[in-house]
Amino acid sequence: MKQKFFITGGMGYLGSAFAKEALKKGYDVCLYDSLIYEQNPSRMIKEISENKKESAELKFIIGDTRNKELLKSSLEYFKPTYVLHFGELSSVYACNHNPIFTENINYKASKQVIDICEELNLKVFYNSTSSVYGTQKESKLMKEEDPLPEPTDYYCRYKLKMEEYIKDKTGKNPNFKIIVFRPATVFGLSPRFRIELLPNHFTYMAISRKMIRVSELNAYRAAIDIDELIQGYFKVIEKDKWKHLIYNIGHHNMSKKGFSIGIQKVVDCKIGSAPDIGDIRNLQIDCSRFNKEFNFYPAISYEKSIEKIAKWIKNNLENLENSNFAEVLNMPLNKWQQICN
């Protein structure tokens, strides 16, 4: 049977990248997105479709996950094999900037998405985040069953509440097929680029300022190239079954200094210190559960990823800055300017 994917947040960073790969494989895709980041649909659809097979179909619905009637009717009409629920606010800064909006989108609307999918017996991918591991006091690869700290931001608060909601639902209905990912920080190129993600941000600073300014140089982060994350999703789809509910998925565990030095090998720049702006995360993740179960072993070198990002930023730098970073930010412009100064 032909695979069909319905993607909430389909015009977002992850959704558009997944859609592009799915169409390239010949699968059908429906993008469901409210365009809150003022994306240009014509440009994006052209890029998403550039390598699609003739047999693949692409549909686009301007829709909000809070609109229960439209969401349900769209799912009933499209009849997807999988629903990829990526339609949440994805940034600590964006969520802290508007807590009520975050609760409405990332919790109330997300519960609604999950409820409808259960009712229609649809398989679901849900992205939580590795940020739920917070600020670790010791150097340790965090596993899925490790105790989690109290969330210090609204982004993690509602991701954890959604994890609990999904655990409760699958406990009551074991036949409901849903998998929860805790991805590392994603970076790399997408039809809808996000410039503020740590390696993307550092590469932009290296090119535009010739200086990567870093707070907490020795703090660790987990990261994964978006192309490898998409490969991981397709590993699950190919197998079409999973043993656990929650999986870490990532590749690199490095300090901010390590991420910066990797960029320095590609772009001629300096590394300097910056004042703390409230992002206190310090974590590394163990992805062995996912890697072993799905035979997934990411191999793209960090420097190879940075080469692609650097080339794109150099080619688009003038337009990015002249447009006040339109389409590429998941955070308030003034906060981004503060980080870059």
Image: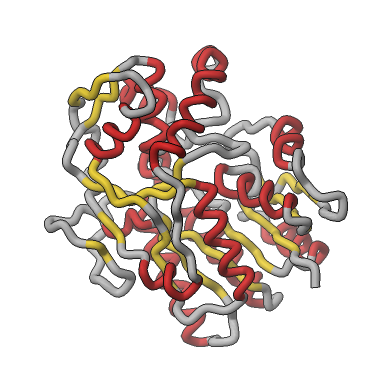
In the image, residue 253 above or below residue 38:
below
The residue at the point 23 percent across, 70 percent down is: 147
Q: Position of residue 207 (x, y in %)?
A: 40, 19
Most extreme residue toward the right is 54
In the image, residue 324 above or below residue 163:
above
**Residue 143 in sight:** yes
Specify the quadrant of the image occupied by residue 34. top right
The residue at the point 35 percent across, 57 percent down is: 130
Q: Quadrant of the C terminus?
A: top left
The residue at the point 56 percent across, 61 percent down is: 233
In the image, residue 80 above or below residue 293:
above
The residue nearer to you, when weighing 132 against 3, is 3
**Residue 112 in sight:** no
The residue nearer to you, when weighing 197 against 32, is 197
Q: Position of residue 52 (x, y in %)?
A: 78, 47
* Figure coloring: secondary structure
Most extreme residue toward the left is 138
The residue nearer to you, when weighing 143 against 160, is 143
The residue at the point 30 percent across, 19 percent down is: 269
Q: Quadrant of the N terminus?
A: bottom right
Specify the quadrant of the image occupied by residue 216. top left
Count numbered badges in the picture.
Answer: 0
Residue 180 as seen in the image, left or right of residue 279? right
Q: Position of residue 114 (x, y in %)?
A: 58, 68
The residue nearer to you, when weighing 136 against 62, is 136
Specify the quadrant of the image occupied by residue 263. top left
In the image, residue 229 above or below residue 171:
above
